Amino acid sequence: PAFKTSTQWTIAPDGRLAIVHGDPYRVDFVDLAGDRVQGQPIPYERERLTDAHKEQWRKEQQRPRPVMYVRPGGASSVHTETPRPQEPEWPRYLPPVEPGWPKKLLMDKAVHFASDGMLWVQRTTPVGEPPTFDVIDETGQVVEQVKLPHRRRLVGFGAGTIYAVRIDDVDLEYLERYRLP
């Protein structure tokens, strides 16, 4: 289903596991010893699903995708196919956490650990709004919210920096580096 709330996870460089739940919106952490810290529900403003969200979903679903066919004997071929998605059952509200649409790359995800150990969770936003992240501490509390510039995608962190990809008007991508606040 489109815009489905799902549990997402990521692993910190120190081995901690963060589990981000969408309903209720909260974050649990599991350390290397297996001890679990269950976060409290995080309050948020619900975002109503709009026709613009539906149209964005439809456009992404109709983008050609590479497909590889492997025949008996090992011969393979690669070409693109344009999917013909069926209209899903639409929810009234978006989940609090970005469900990964539109999926550009397999590695795109909504939850990232920064090099300082803080968890960044991408929130759903109105169509056309810049990517917005809740920055969450080790107790599961939001300590700040960060908005990237328009048409940017978070791809990684460095020492005191974040790396984002800027997407231009013809979908060319450029790597950018920003200092962490």
Image: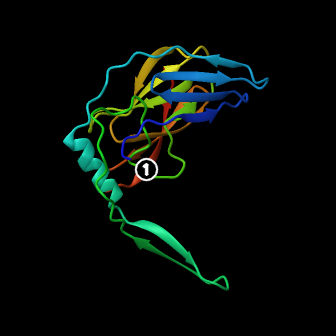
142 sits to left or right of 36: left
Q: Is residue 92 above or below residue 57?
A: above
Residue 29 in percent (x, y) is at 64, 23
The image position of residue 154, as x and y in percent, is 48, 38
Indicate the secondary structure of the residue bearing disc 1.
Answer: loop
Q: Where is residue 145 in the image (x, y as percent from the top left)?
A: 42, 20
Most extreme residue toward the left, as rendered?
Answer: 51
> Can I make out residue 114 in this image?
no
Q: Position of residue 143 (x, y in %)?
A: 49, 13
Asked whether, in this view, residue 46 is left or right of residue 77, the answer is: left
Quarter where residue 36 is shown: top right
Q: Which coloring applies here?
A: rainbow
**Residue 20: quarter of image:** top right
Q: Name the residue under label 1.
A: 103
| Residue at image coords 38%, 55% | 172
Q: Which of 159 and 73 is in front in this view?
A: 73
Task: Write the residue at 73% across / 27% down.
Answer: 14
Given residues 23 and 136, the one toward you in this image is: 23
Tally of marks: 1
Residue 48 at least partly seen? yes
Residue type for callout 1: Lys
Residue at screen point 37% across, 41% down: 3
- The furthest residue to the front: 89
Q: Residues within 10 Å of mark 1 (few under 14, many from 20)?
A: few
The residue at 38%/32% (across/down) is: 95
Q: In this view, does 29 lie above or below 68?
A: above
